[in-house]
């Protein structure tokens, strides 16, 4: 019997950890990206969070190197933008309202991405929130976290 592979959806914390050698989850993030088969799906909100935190948490030189690495990940399609938030605003905002104040826009987009995917798995460092969030109102979200 052929086993279907999970669709891997990646949260901002994993990308941040992989790009920042001083992050406490750096080695785990590097390992999870190396030990899984791309592409890793993201939404633009996740990339926006990544850009913001790289700019605010790293020195200018380290941030520049991290942005170069992120750009390469996108160009080789290791990381693929695969979500149009404007098509799902109603559901995104409903989730944000339901899980306020802990759920931000990016997390809501990730949850909706899982709802649009037959066999999703989220790669995240946010174990607490993704243990709480539910897809389709009742189903737990399969995820890997350190």
Image (spheres, rainbow, N blue to C red):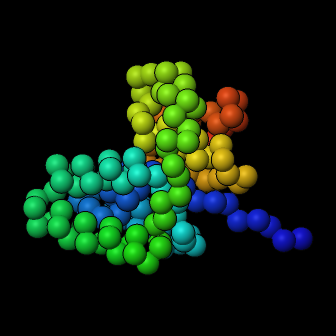
Q: Is residue 94 above or below residue 134?
A: above
Residue located farthest toward the right when viewing the structure as drawn: 1
Q: Residue placed at 65% from the left, 43% from the top?
A: 115
- Answer with the quarter of the image where residue 102 lies: top left
Q: Out of 113 and 10, give the one closest to the viewer.
A: 113
Q: Residue placed at 55% from the left, 42% from the top?
A: 87
Residue located farthest toward the left when viewing the structure as drawn: 60
Q: Residue placed at 53% from the left, 21% from the top?
A: 98
Q: Out of 116 and 58, give the one closest to the viewer.
A: 116
Q: Residue 75 at x, y = what percent? A: 40, 75
Residue located farthest toward the bottom when viewing the structure as drawn: 76
Q: Residue 145 at x, y = what percent? A: 50, 51
Q: How many marks?
A: 0
Q: Residue 118 at x, y = what percent? A: 73, 52
- Decide if residue 17 is in sight here: yes
- Decide if residue 111 is in sight here: no
What quarter of the picture does the N terminus occupy? bottom right
Q: Is residue 70 above or below residue 14?
A: below
Q: Answer with left or right where residue 37 lies relative to residue 128.
A: right
Q: Residue 47 at x, y = what percent? A: 36, 54
Q: Residue placed at 57% from the left, 31% from the top?
A: 91
Q: Is residue 11 above or below residue 7?
A: above
């Amino acid at each position: 019997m052929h086993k279907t592979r999970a669709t891997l959806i990646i949260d901002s914390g994993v990308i941040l950890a992989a790009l920042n050698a001083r992050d406490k989850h750096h080695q785990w993030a590097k390992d999870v990206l190396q030990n899984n088969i791309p592409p890793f799906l993201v939404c633009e909100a996740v990339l926006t969070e990544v850009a913001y935190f790289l700019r605010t948490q790293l020195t200018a030189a380290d941030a520049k190197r991290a942005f170069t690495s992120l750009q390469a990940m996108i160009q080789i399609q290791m990381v693929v933008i695969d979500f149009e938030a404007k098509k799902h605003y109603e559901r995104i905002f409903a989730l944000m309202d339901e899980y306020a104040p802990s759920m931000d826009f990016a997390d809501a987009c990730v949850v909706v991405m899982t709802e649009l995917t037959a066999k999703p798995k989220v790669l995240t460092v946010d174990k607490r929130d993704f243990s709480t969030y539910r897809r389709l109102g009742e189903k737990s979200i399969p995820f890997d976290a350190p």
